[in-house]
Image: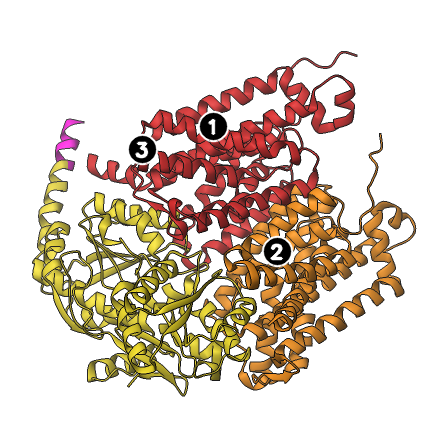
Amino acid sequence: MLAQQLFNALVLGSVYALFALGFTLTFGVLRVINLLYGFYVAAGAFAALVAVQSLGLGLWAAGAFGVVTAGLVAVVCDFLVLTPLRRAKAPELSSLIVTLGGVLLMNSLMQIAFGAEVRRFPARLLSQDAIAIGPLLVAPIQLVIIATVFVLVAALFWFMERTRLGTAIRAVAERPDTAALMGVNVGLVVSGVSFLSAALSAAAGILIGLDFNAVHPYMGEPMMLRGFAIIVIGGLGDIRGALVAGLALGFLEVMTAGYLSSNLKEAVAFTALILGLWLRPNGLFGRASGKRA
Amino acid sequence: MNRRTVLAAAIVSAATALSGQAFAAEPVKVGAIECLTGLNAKYGTMIKPGFDLALDEINAKGGVLKGRPIELIYEDSASQKEQAINAAKKLIGRDHVVAILGPTLSSEMFAAGPVANERGIPIIGTSNTAKGITDIGEFVFRTSLPESDVLPVTLKKAQAKFGIKKVALLYSNDDSFTKSGFDVFKETLDKLGIEIATIETFSTKDTDFSAQLTKIKSLNVDALVVSALAEAGGGLVLQARQLGIPKTVPIIGGNGFNSPKIAEIAGDAAEGVISGSPWFIAKEGAQNQNFVDSFRKKYNMDPDQFAAQAYDTMYILAAAFDRAGEADSKKLRDALIKTENNGLLGPFKFGADRSPATAEGVVVTTIKGGKFTLLQ
Amino acid sequence: MMTTLDDLLWSYQSLIYGLGTNAILGLSMYAVLQLGQLSLGQAAFMGIGAYTGALLTLKLGLPFPLVLAAAAAAPALAALVIGGPTMKLSGVHLAIATIGLGEVLRVAYINTDAMGGALGLSGIPEKADFSIIFGLLAVILAGFILASRSKIGRACEAIREDEDAARVMGIDVSAYKMTALVISAALAGLAGALNAHFSSFIGPNEFAFETAVSILSFAILGGVTTPFGPVLGAFVLTALPELLRPLHDFRLVFNGLIIVLVVIFLPRGILGFRIRRTGKPPPC
């Protein structure tokens, strides 16, 4: 049973990590608690669903479609809603509230467009039968999740370290004003981050939609709370931290439910958060920042 | 100044007297509070067509009280209890409705029920199955069978058929309806002498049950007993089979499993899932067939249990109006207690506690080929 | 004629009471924002107050004033306990940690049968009324206005601007922060108990993340430069879903749109334009 539980933890942790990556990027670079992030989970899932049902695309093509669509939607939304605030140098909290209004607006529009009922991806997309690998029983979707997350994370790290835009993003995350002085096109970076993080969020949404076989307008909300905990534990803006914290949270939740009591599963995320803040307030990999006078 | 006042008074009294003549076709106002938006909209958006279909049929045949159509005023509670309370107050205080249908959720009824009860307006829940609903007051009714009537029937039949001795009991612990279901399941399992190997919980919004299910698999139980809403339930069934819990271990569900969504979400994995219900789509009889056909034709989708219950309740309300003889809330209340109906849910009347009197119509169903059929 | 007016008022009663309790919640948020502290525990404190109040009324039948006092005291005590550790946090860390408090409590309520578990507590008698709610609101508001005009107000502004400088100038920053947290908790608890005593029912899911963000938005929308700001923000955001009722399906769409537009065009909040308090100009 232990092997199976560990595998369960890997799958769950991968989804959490994927979601947290985009979330921490948004926060680290845009310095905004963007509540719309949860909406992009559903947006991606619905876009992929439409791709499968109306355009007849297969699994991977529909997935790519969903991810790209959500990214574009995010660029537009974030631009409309966050840029005016940035220009007015508004207090940080206004971004939180404006995205609150935004998520209310977008979720309702989505419900009007698609209806409140739960939809599912057609069963033909992916085989539902479990495969036996050693002592484990593995569903194909679980393999898809692990593979996808692995590839996306590797791609993200490569992108951030080795491309110009990635370096520019890291520069803006560190010091936006200096980066601008150094000739970085901050507007482009912001759009790039909006696109990237929403794309990651959408990917998480599509995977959840496939795994759980249910797609509905509010599907992103439960992830948001865990996302908060993960990005704080991992360190705000730190993508390595988000990856490790996401996997760790998946592990903790599964072990708690499997070996302690499933009643406690919901409390794991925030208990871990409180411990994390107590033991490592700057995140898993953070360096203590001295207070400057 | 004085002459004008007298003239105004005269006109007003004349108008009032004249309007008395037009009384015959004046609609009877009834309010309905449902979750039309928000997290639980999927239930409200099935209840509304159930009401509407019955309403159209009743009004087409002349309405109630010798020719008065029923006017149904909907208010959305957006799955929030404050809004359910505000909706009740608006319907009673501003729209002056004679009765209220709904609210959708048990938690909303606990909030809005006292409001209607205090004002002497009958309020009829069509989908509340938690314990203690009608204890709120003597104007509070419900037409939905409480879990305590349905679940024992389901368990007894399953035990008889499969020889179940040891089970795993799962439920979502953050919803009042599924928690009530769990309480009933546990009590019944104890009474039937079935051993509960483990009790596992999850959240209504959870999408991953692998930890709990892997643990359960290692315990070699005879069946899984689950109290959950349709989404979580469907996902759970799917994951249970994927993790290798064999079909020889049946999954028995509570009221939330009476939705076609279970089969939709779980696909093949849903084969053999057992639940109990006073109604299911393939129930025999011309009345049900007509209902299902009309529903499909008008709304382009299959009705579910919520739609059927709403439909029956509208007919029960109409019958009660006719029995009461006038659109008066107190008389309506007294009439409701005595009203009988033979509808989609079988023979119906209210018990002394204003919940359904019998559980006669309950059948135990199993999913075969993606559809609900009777468990033999 | 009289019955229609009575009916009208009664039908809006919950809404009106809700305006009052939400205004108190807005002020409880204001108390900590004054010091630049993004502590979002108000929803959790509200929950503690609501459950304390409801349980005292339902199980012990205590008189209402006593119940209210206890409902304010319980979360205040909780604040004293968590105040110490959270003092070290700031900004977003503090926000997320305090939201976490609400979530942990939610799980606790669900798993405690004595508190009704997932079914919550129902049948709470209606003991709150217009004069109690708005009377308390007026007193609290007056308190804030007086405080902002006094040395306390100046100290708060100093702390908000630059914590270290304030400390160097001799202001006991920790004491101010703790006091603000305790006051914020007491006010939130009070609002929670008042709410419980006119909603007749409370459940564990009402005092978590969404509520915390909601309370924050009362303060931000109205503006935090004057105590009237959060009150106005609360009034607007509470009334909006009810005012938009005629729009049916599009209600939440417009609700969201209005919030977005207000924040974009008035980023400092509706009453944010009052940047300077009235008072003597600083000496040259």
Residue type at tag 2? Arg
Q: Residue furthest right?
A: A182
Query: What colouring does the structure picture have?
Result: by chain
Q: Chain of mark 2?
A: A
Q: Nearer the viewer, mark 3 or mark 2?
A: 3
Q: CA distance from mark 1 to mark 3?
A: 17 Å
- Tell me the residue at 31%/50% (across/down): B110
**Shade of chain C as shown in the rendered figure:** red
Magenta stretch: includes residue A111:
no
Q: Which residue is mark 3?
A: C60
Foreground of the two, C197 or C282? C197
Is disc 3 in the same subunit as disc 2?
A: no
Say if the magenta span includes residue B4. yes
Residue C51 seen = yes
Q: Tell me where the magenta segment starts and ends, as one range.
A: B1-8
Is residue B286 shown above or below A199? below
Task: Pick the quarter of the image with the N terminus of chain C.
Answer: top left
In the image, residue A198 lies at what x, y percent?
68, 63
Which labelled disc corresponds to residue C156?
A: none
**What colour is chain B?**
yellow
Q: CA distance from mark 1 to mark 2?
A: 31 Å
The residue under the point 76% across, 11% down is C283
Q: For the residue labelled by badge 2, is the local secondary structure a helix, a strand or a loop?
A: helix
Q: Position of residue A39 (x, y in %)?
A: 59, 61
Q: Quadrant of residue C177?
A: top right
Distance Cα–Cα, label 3 vs label 2? 38 Å
Q: Colour of chain A?
A: orange
Q: What residue is disc 2 on?
A: A226
Q: Depth check: give the residue in front, C8 or B122.
A: B122
Q: Residues within 10 Å of mark 2 (few under 14, many from 20)?
A: many
Tag 1: residue type? Ala
Residue C73: mark? 1
